[in-house]
């Protein structure tokens, strides 16, 4: 059986978008869907009475059962399962992502899961997950392009491959964005020479993906500026923004690159972070 899409739910206001996003992708890719809830009450060290634990268990079971019912009502062809983890949300997400084709999360809510997506723990989850992580914020129009950040790094090449594959499945185009800083170092060349060099970075990074998906329209943008600010602006007109976990300028030991971290907080569209 194909690896499932795992969707994390917590009962917060971001649940519906994440669940609907995951349902659409599972149907599009013909893969199973797993609904994951990490029970916050069980993941604390506070001693609780049996009655409180029983109530917590019933609440968690109702949450996942309701989500499964939504999946079955929307598409009965999807093979759906559910799991309630007693672990901390971040630990549960990282663990279940190991055998997933994709991890889908919402980013609105007050629970530990929602906080994990938004905060420093979220950066850890995204950085350590062994599959693409989708932060589902909206259900944007499918006519909008897939925007991918390009810098020539290995993570960037993985992001480009995902972006073209996603665009091919959804019959959309790819807008490849490369944002750079002008160099004043000796030997860097004048500005026109630097522009040509950076355009080559984009062309070379896209080459394999374009060969695999020749029918996917692609546009390139190479500009001087701030990468995360430019991509955040692009996200206002994108159906999905795709970035790698680490860019070319990431420092050794960083869990997640600065651009990816900034977009976790600031992107308007759904965000895909690719390992």
Image (cartoon, rainbow, N blue to C red):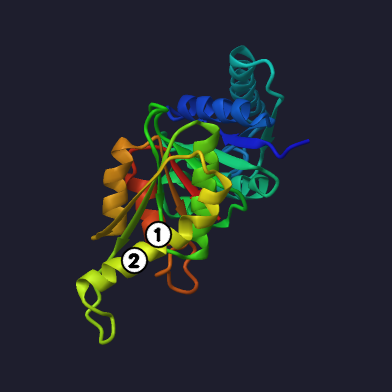
Q: Are marks 2 and 1 in contact (CB under 8 Å)?
A: yes
Residue drawn at (25%, 83%) of the image: 185
- In percent of width and height, residue 217 lies at 43, 40
Given residues 28 and 57, the one toward you in this image is 28
Percent across and percent down for residue 8 are: 56, 36
Numbered disc 1: secondary structure: helix
Q: Is residue 40 visible?
A: yes
Q: Is residue 38 left or right of residue 80?
A: left
Q: Which residue is mark 2?
A: 198
Q: Residues within 10 Å of mark 2 (few under 14, many from 20)?
A: many
On the rendered image, what quadrant is the N terminus found in? top right
Give the residue at x 45% y 34%. 172
Is 200 on the left-hand or right-hand side of 44?
Answer: left
Dot 2: element: helix
- The x and y percentages for residue 173 are 42, 38
Say which residue label 1 marks.
Answer: 202
């Amino acid at each position: 059986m194909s690896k499932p899409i795992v969707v994390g739910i917590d009962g917060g206001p971001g649940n519906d978008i994440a669940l609907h996003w995951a349902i659409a992708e599972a149907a599009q890719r013909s893969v199973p869907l797993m609904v994951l809830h990490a029970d916050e009450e069980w993941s604390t060290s506070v001693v609780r009475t049996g009655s409180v634990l029983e109530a917590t268990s019933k609440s968690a079971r109702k949450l996942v059962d309701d989500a499964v019912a939504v999946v079955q009502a929307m598409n009965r062809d999807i093979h759906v399962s559910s799991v309630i983890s007693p672990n901390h949300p971040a630990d549960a997400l990282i663990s279940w992502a190991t055998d997933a084709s994709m991890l889908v999360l919402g980013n609105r809510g007050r629970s530990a899961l929602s906080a994990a997506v938004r905060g420093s723990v979220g950066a850890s989850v995204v950085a350590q997950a062994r599959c693409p992580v989708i932060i589902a914020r909206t259900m944007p129009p499918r006519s909008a392009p897939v925007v991918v950040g390009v810098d020539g790094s290995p993570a960037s090449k993985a992001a480009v491959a995902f972006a073209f594959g996603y665009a091919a499945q959804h019959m959309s185009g790819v807008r490849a964005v490369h944002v750079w800083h002008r160099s004043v170092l000796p030997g860097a060349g004048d500005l026109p020479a630097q522009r040509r060099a950076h355009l080559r970075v984009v062309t070379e990074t896209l080459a394999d993906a374009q060969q695999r998906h020749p029918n996917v329209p692609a546009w390139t943008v190479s500009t001087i500026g701030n990468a995360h600010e430019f991509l955040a602006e692009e996200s206002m007109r994108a159906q999905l923004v795709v970035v790698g976990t680490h860019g070319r300028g990431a420092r050794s030991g960083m869990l997640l690159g600065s651009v990816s971290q900034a977009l976790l907080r600031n992107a308007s569209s759904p965000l895909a972070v690719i390992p």
